[in-house]
Amino acid sequence: MPPLAPTVKLNNGRDIPALGLGTWQATPGEVREAVKHAIDAGYRHIDTAAVYRNESEVGEALQEKFKEGAVKREEVFVTSKLWNTCHRPELVVPTCKKTLADLKLDYVDLYLVHWPFAYKEGDEFYPAENGIAITTDIDYLDTWKQMEECVNLGLAKSIGVSNFNSKQLSRLLEAATIKPVINQIECHPYLNQKKLIEFCKQRDIVVTAYSPLANPSITMPAGGLPLLQNPKLKLLAAKYKKTVAQVVLRYVFQLGTVPIPKSFTKKRIEENIHIFDFELSNDDVTDISKLNKNYRVFPHAQAKHSKYYPFHDEF
Ligand code: NAP
């Protein structure tokens, strides 16, 4: 059996594996193989979302692994997310049930509000006019009450948020009956999120780090050197006899977050989970932190007119 990632305690007493597999940007067939390979490689945490349009395939892969006896349901931590078009309170529970049907599961381990702002309802995931998202003013506090209902109904073991800034989290914490366990945010050496991580830590909210490799498939603005080609990181990779991706994931883990790198390449899926057998020195962590330039892979600028857009504030 391959070594498993350690676990991190959530504020409701449950455990989350300290590294997961991201599943965004799948072409048909890819994600099924990736999830199965990841389970074989020791992953016990899969991150998906309705908007990735791959929950059925993720579910098929999980079912195959359950049937094979490779893992039991209770040994795998599955996260999904409520999309922006489904924030109206009446839609939350049915949308969660649809995700469960697609995943072929009785419950998700974690259900997240994907973004704090809402989009016009309908079949289109990205309703827009001239490149500008059509948003609505549904308050995420009203959505949250129904996220709590998902827990009460046993559809989700834990609930949390994604892409919330510190003010939005404070407002949510004041109103919530069930506290969010996670804030899933973009985090990598070019956007190390130290202030928001510290803010979450003080409130016992775990941070999941998305795009932990600064998603090399997305071209950086002109002149920007892709993270995995950074010379400082290459030197550190040689020093620790690891790959640059492993150094980056280890850094993100040592910041106190749970990275969820996506790969559909077998070798990289294996590579990305092998970060728990070495430790970066404090000096090297400090050095990597100097690479921060507040570069966002996902500014989601098409929604920046929304009153709930999270990235106008510093953190
Ligand atoms: P990422 O994990 O930073 O990068 C993924 C890219 O890196 C893929 O193109 C992958 O290629 C490549 N890659 C993976 N491992 C590698 C390695 N060891 N060496 C070189 N290249 C490697 O970016 P992401 O997919 O944007 O983020 C990860 C996950 O976070 C997503 O899949 C999704 O589950 C979640 N996410 C959440 C949000 C949110 O709003 N909550 C937003 C974005 C992402 P191959 O697949 O070809 O190997």
Image (cartoon, rainbow, N blue to C red):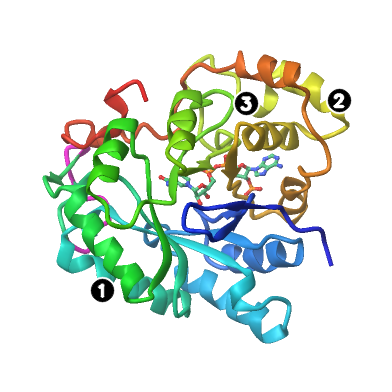
Residue carrying label 3: 227
Q: Secondary structure at mark 2?
A: helix
Q: Are marks 3 and 2 in contact (CB under 8 Å)?
A: no
Q: CA distance from mark 1 to mark 3?
A: 40 Å
Q: CA distance from mark 1 to mark 2?
A: 50 Å
Seen in the picture, residue 57 relative to 253 is either above or below; the reply is: below
On residue 94, which mark appears? 1
Q: Mark 3 and mark 2: span between their CA atoms?
A: 16 Å
What's the amino acid at mark 1?
Pro
Upstream in sequence: badge 1 or badge 2: 1
Between 204 and 206, the one nearer to me in the picture: 204
Please report the bounds of the magenta region as a residue range.
Answer: 122-132
Q: Residue at x 58, y 68 (%)?
A: 29
Q: Earlier in the sequence, mark 1 or mark 3?
A: 1
In this rendering, position of residue 307 left or right of residue 275? left
Instruction: Residue 309 in the image: state x and y as whole percent.
Output: 24, 34
Q: Quadrant of residue 280?
A: top right
| Residue at the outermost left position | 137
124 and 208: which one is in front? 208
Instruction: Left or right? Give the position of 256 relative to 150.
Output: right
Question: Is residue 116 something one can see in this rendering?
Answer: no
- Residue at image position (22%, 48%) is 175
For the C terminus, the image quarter is top left
Q: Three-letter amino acid code at disc 2? A: Ala
Residue wearing tag 2: 238
Residue 103 coordinates in the image, percent (x, y): 46, 74
Report the amino acid beneath label 3. Leu
Corner quadrant of residue 86: bottom left
Q: Please say if the residues under marks 1 and 2 sit with CB atoms less than 8 Å apart.
A: no
